[in-house]
Amino acid sequence: MDLRHHLAGLRWHLCTAELRNLRNTFAREHPLFIFQAISNHAARAAGLEPTRDLFFHPDSLLEQGATIHRGTSYRLTYVFPRLEPVAIDRFRHALATHLADPAHNFELLATSAPRPRRLDDLLAEQSDLAGAEELCLDFLTPLPFTPKDKKRDWLLDPAALLELLRRRLQRFYDLDLPDLAPLAADLRLLPYYWELFTRTHDSKSTGQRQQLIGRIGPLYLRGALGPLLPLLLVCQELHAGRRIANGQGHYRLLRERPFFDPHLDDLPGFCETMAETCRQSDIAREIDETSLDREALYADLQRELAAGRLRARPARGLHVPKRRGGDRLIATLAPEDYLAHKFLQRRLAPVLDRMFEESSVGFRPHRSREEAGRMIRRLCDEGFCHVLESDIAAFFDQVDWDILTARLADHLPLADRRTLALLRQVIETPLELAGKPLPRERGLLQGSPLSPLLANLYLDALDEAVRARGYQLIRYADDFLVLTRGPEEAQQAWRDIRDILAGLKLELKEEKTRVAPVDLGFSFLGLSFGPGMDEDYINNASASKTLFVRSEFVFLGLDYDSLIVRRGGQLLERLPLRQISEIVVLGANTVSTALLHRCGKDNIPVSFCSAAGYYHTTLRPDSRRHFILAGKHLQRFTTLTPEDLVTLAARIVSAKLHNYLSWFSERWPSEADETRHELETAIAAVSKAVSIEAIRGFEGLAARHVFRFVNDRCADEAFRAGGRRKREKQDRFNSLLDFAYFLLFTRLNVLVRGRGLNPYLGVLHSHKDNYESLVCDLQEPFRCRMDRFVLKLLNRAVIRPEHFHQDGEGRYSLEGPAVGLVLEHFEREMDTRLSRDGGTLKQTLIAQVHAVEQWVHDGGELKLFRAG
C-alpha cells in the first residue's frame, strides 16, 4: 500500500506566533483554553472560521496542571490546511491588533510569514525515521478517543489509531484513502505510557462549560512502520482526531524516546525517591548499620544505575517453612541492592500495572481480595456453576529468565537500554546459602521488591491466553480459579491451561487441581463460596489472617506494603499487609514505629502477650465512630436492671451449654446420655436462676461434667487429666486447652476493641478494671469449638506428649515448634465451617461481635451464637 502516493498532493501552511503574558487574569485556566480564545477573536476579526480554517498547537508540552505565568513567553504554531498566504496575513494582522490592547493580557512579540508545507518536506527533514523498528508519537496536547474498555481507558488498538489519523485528514481534504486495516494488522501499540489529561473551562463568550479530555505523553508503535510513515509524518503537523479546538491531538514523531532511562540520570530525583523509601520502610535502619554517610551511599548507587551496571552483591538465602508443609527460599538483599530494586519497582509499577488483565488481583494497587470475591459472586449469579481450582508448581523458583527478559523487551521502549540491562542484572542477582554460592539459572528472588511485579508480567501471558479462549479466570499470584458453565468446559480449561503454562516452562500443581460444582462450596483467598453461606457472613469475614509472632528477639518492620520479620539482619519472612487482619506478638520482640504507624492507618490491631501466652495489651486504631459507639455501649449497659443482667448471663450460659449438647449429640449419640442429661438439667436450672452467682454455680457444675467427658475421649492416656485447672498447667491437656482458649480470647478481644465496643462491660464475669469481662462472656458460646479443636489435635497425633516440656515446678508448656503447629491448625480451624453452623468459625465470631453492636444501637435482645 503506497500512502505516499495518496498524500503527496496535500498542501498546508504553518506560521508561528510568540506571545508574552502581561498580567495573569485567568490564573486558574489551562493555557490551551486561553490560547483558543485568543485565536477565536483573531480568526473572526479576519473573517475566518476558527474550527474550519485553522488550528494551533504549543511547541512544548503544557502539562495538566499548567497555568499562565506573568512575564512568560509562549510559542504557538498555527496550521492552515486550506488557506492561501493572503488570508493568513489577515489573521496575523488581526492577532496583532487584538493583542495590542493591554486589556487582553498578552503582547505579541513576533509572528512568522506563512510557510508552505507538504509531505516531501517532512520526509526530507526526518529521513532518520526510515527503517525504524519503533516510533513514538509523543502527544503534547491531549488526544481524545472513545475507549473500548472504560475500566482500562488508556488502551488504544492500531486500527483505532489509524482511524483517528484518517478522520483528521478527511476533515480538511477530499481524500480517498485506501482501507488501512491491512496496515493495522502488522502493527502493535504500547498504550501504557501516556497519561489521562482532563480539564474544564467555563467559556466567557458562550457561557458553556467546555471539557478537555484525552491522553498525553508517549504512544509507542512497533511493526511494519515503513508503509505507515507518510501518514504519521503528515499528521504530526495536521494532528490526530476530529476535534479541532484547543490544539488537541498534536504529537511529535520520534525514532527513540526513552521513558525510564532519563530517571537513572536524575540524582536529586533519585535521592528524593530513596528518602521516601526510607520513610515508608525500615530499610534506613539497615543502611545506617552498614554506611556512615547515607547521602554518599545514594550518590554511589545512582552512579551505578546511571551507568546501567550494578555491582554483583550476593543476596543471602534462608529456607523458611511453609505453613502447610515444605519450605521456601527467602532472599535478603544487601541494603544497596534493596534500594536499587525498590527504585526500579517504583518507576516500573505504574506503567506495567496498566498492562495486566483485570483477572489478575494480586500484588496490585487498588485491587483486593474483596474485589475478587465480588467478581466470583457475580459470575456465580450469571450461571457459572463449575469451578477449576489450581495453582502453579514452584512458580517463583521456575520463572524462565529468557522468557521474562523477552517480555520486558517486548513491553519497554527500545530506547530504555540501560533499564533493560539493569533488570536483567536484577533478575540474575547472585545468591548465597549458608555462606556458599548457590547456582541460579531461573527463578525470582522472594525478598526482592521487584519480584511480585515481574511475576505478574510473566503470568500476564497466561491471563491473556486464557481470556482469548473465553474462560473466566481470577488469579492471585500463582493461585487461580476458572469459573465455567459446565464440567466439560472446566476439564477443557484444565487441559488448555496446562498447555499454556508449558509454553512458559511452568506446570500445574496437579495434586491441588480439581474441578467441582460451585454448589459443593469452595474457598479462594480466604473467602468461602457456596450454598447456605449468608452474604453478611461473607462480606464481614476478613479474607486476611492473624499473624502470630512466636519467635523471640526478632524485629518486625515495614517495607512499603509488606511486613518484614528479621533476626540479626537476616530476613525471616515478608508478608503483604493486606493479608494480615491483626498481629499478635508473643514474648520479647521489637516492633518498629513505622510499622505501628502503618498498622494504625490500615486498621490492623497489634496485641502483645507474654511468651507463655498471657495477654497484655492491644494497640488499635480509633476514630470518632469508635468513641461514639463506646459511649452508646456504656449508656446501654448502665440502663440494664439487675433482672436484665441475670437474664443476659443466663442466655450466655445457656448458649454455651446448648452448643456442647449439640456437639455431643451429633458426635457421640450413644455415649453421651449421662452428660447430655446433666447439660439439659443445667440449662433448665439456669433458665430459672434468680442471681448471677447461682448461674455461675450451675455453669461450673456442668463444666466439670463436660471436661470429664471431653478428656475421656482422648485416645492417648498421657493426656488424661484429673479435672479442669485453669492456668496451672499441671498436665498436658489443661496446658493445651489454656493455649486454645487464649487464642480464642485474643481473636475476640481484637474484634471487640476494633469495633469500638468496651471490652470491660460484661455480665457473667468479673468487673475488675484489668479483666475484659465482655470478651470472656462472648467466649463462652465458642468454648466447645476450642475443646473440639484440642481433641482433634490430640487424637490425630498432631500434638504428641513429646511436644511438651516440664519446668522445675512441674508445669507443662508446648515446645517452640509445637506452638507453630497449634497456630497453623488454629488458623485452619478459623476457616472451618461445621455442617450445623451458618459460616466458618471466623465468620461466626465476627457476626457475634456485630450482634453486640446491633444490641447497643437497637436496644433489642442480644443474639448469641447457637449451633444448629
Image (cartoon, rainbow, N blue to C red):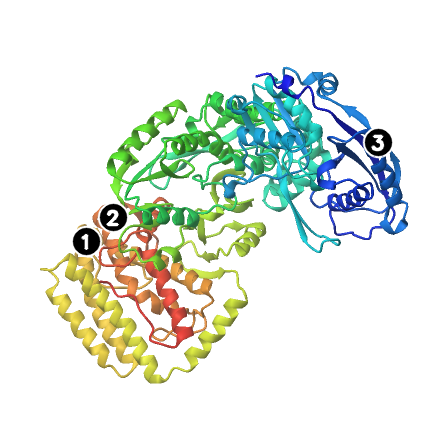
Task: Point out the frontmost of discs 3 and 1.
Answer: 3
Q: State the SS at label 3.
A: helix
Determine contact: label 3, label 2, CB under 8 Å: no
Residue under label 1: 714
Q: Which mark is on residue 110?
A: none
Q: How far apart are marks 3 and 2 (CA)?
A: 78 Å
Frontmost residue, 620 versus 65: 65
Q: Residues within 10 Å of mark 2 (few under 14, many from 20)?
A: some
Frontmost residue, 330 versus 368: 368
Residue under label 3: 86
Residue 864 in the image: above or below residue 67: below
Residue under label 2: 519
Q: How crowded is mark 1: few (under 14 residues within 10 Å), some or many (20 or more)?
A: some
Residue 554 in view (yes/no): yes
Task: Point out the frontmost of discs 3 and 2.
Answer: 3
Q: State the SS at label 2.
A: helix
The residue shown at (49%, 36%) is: 356
Q: On the image, which quarter does residue 170 sit in?
A: top right
**Which amino acid lies under the numbered mark 3 shown in the image of this protein?**
Val
Q: How crowded is mark 3: few (under 14 residues within 10 Å), some or many (20 or more)?
A: few
**Which amino acid lies under the numbered mark 1 shown in the image of this protein?**
Cys
Residue 294 in view (yes/no): no
The residue shown at (60%, 28%) is: 220
Q: State the SS at label 1.
A: loop
Give the mark nearest the N terminus, 3 or 1: 3
The residue shown at (72%, 20%) is: 122
